[in-house]
Amino acid sequence: MSKHPSGRNMTVGSPTGHILAVALPLLAGSFLQQFYNLVDSWVVGNYVSEAALAAVGMGFPVMTFFQALFIGLSTGGTVVIAQYYGAGKPEEVRNAVNTIYTAFVRSVIPVTVGALALLKPMLWLLRVDEGAYHETFIYLAVVTVGLVGTIGYNLNSGIMGGLGNSQTTLIFLVIAAVMNIVLDLVFVLVFGMGVFGVALATALAQGCSWLFGMVYINRKYPEIAIHPFNGYLDGKLLRKIIEIGLPTGLQMSLVSIGVMAVTSKVNSFGTEIYGAGFNVGNKLDSMAFLPVQSLCSAVTAFVGQNMGANKPERATRGTWIAVTISGVWTLISAVILLRWGDVCASVFTPEATVVDATVIYLNCIMPPYIFFTTFYVLCASMRGAGDGVFPMINTIASMLVLRVPALYYLANHYGPEYMYWGYAVGWVVGCGLSVWYYWTGRWKKKGSLAN
């Protein structure tokens, strides 16, 4: 392949400029994605029922669990593509794209069938009460059938992310957001389809966004055109992608189990009050995390390209710039949600009891939030350098092994008003371990995968 894929070369120039140039379009796209997720919650919370609102919220950790291995594949692909792009090896970039899609095509149907079979055991784990069970099952079944679109969208985003091209990812998200919002309103308000309509809107929007993404990439980037059924699979490249991405996928799966365990405990205090309040609080928490999430994606690509170009010092400089930016934003968002959390929650539900449950959640998690965001940015940087094992171990330890028992202990001994302080236990330990490991420099030992 003679033509180099057109992306952003982040191995020269201002690290801050590159990171922001990649992060800001991702942020805009993430706001769109969260906005249409918020529309889901707003529609069901105001026009269906509190049980439906809880159902939509409980669907998130379950779907994350099912998508996790493919998101890991996407993350591994981003790092490998970024390192080969930074090293100036376009042929390997194209081979990586073909390998990622072949692995996706061969495994997505078995994963979808397996996910459908696991739905009822998942609902049992979540301790969904009778009032919300039917709607939760319908929502999850429809969204699970649409997994192919969601996973495909993430793969397209990962490919573009490796090239440092977040503007294209924004286009994918605009398609999904507009479709989802329009279909939500039509299916629920016009046709009265309830939670089934919300789930169907999400599945259709993600599927169309994925297909549009493939067409767009093939037209604008013919040098890395996606041919999902060409059967090309480079075993060596796939092992590299899995080596980096599998820890991320396993981490997400296990953390999702932790979130489901937390949800189960929350639901034990009442799905239609505490379950719904937990859902609304998660929506607001997710909005606060969006800029940090975008910075994490940007720093993964930035570090990947610079490690590929054998510039570890530049990778380190960009990482600490991202940590600083995320810290400033976290403090701002914490002040907003601690001061006006009740006002924000009332947008999603008119029920005062659900608003109060949401405020309890926010008052516990926002004060220590900066530990969480710092820990996340450092882990993203390590993944960009090809070190996915330590971030996986640290994340599982902090988000599952420490957080869940701490939350259960506080819930059992002090009640639901204090249980969410269990989050702080995991975040503080995870942040401390991430800072220590990063300062040791051991993450640099992977070197460049492109050598």
Image (cartoon, rainbow, N blue to C red):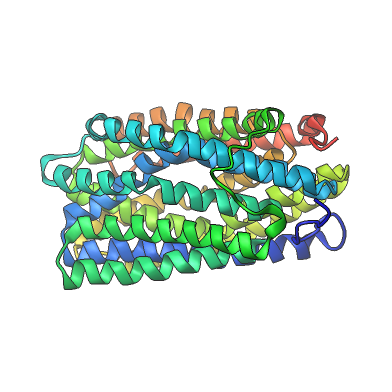
Residue 213 left/right relative to 436 = left
Q: Residue at x 32, y 45 (%)?
A: 145
Closer to the camera, 136 or 218? 218
Closer to the camera, 40 or 199? 199
Residue 215 left/right relative to 410 = right
Corner quadrant of residue 450: top right
- The image shows a total of numbered marks equal to 0
Q: Is residue 343 above or below residue 268?
A: below
Residue 260 left/right relative to 55 = right
Closer to the camera, 364 or 193? 193
Whole-percent x and y of residue 241? 65, 34
Q: Residue at x 26, y 71 (%)?
A: 185
Whole-percent x and y of residue 320? 75, 50
Whole-percent x and y of residue 368? 52, 47
Corner quadrant of residue 375: top right
Q: Residue at x 47, y 46 (%)?
A: 151
Q: Is residue 322 above or below residue 79?
A: below
Q: Residue at x 39, y 27 (%)?
A: 405
Quarter holding the C terminus is top right
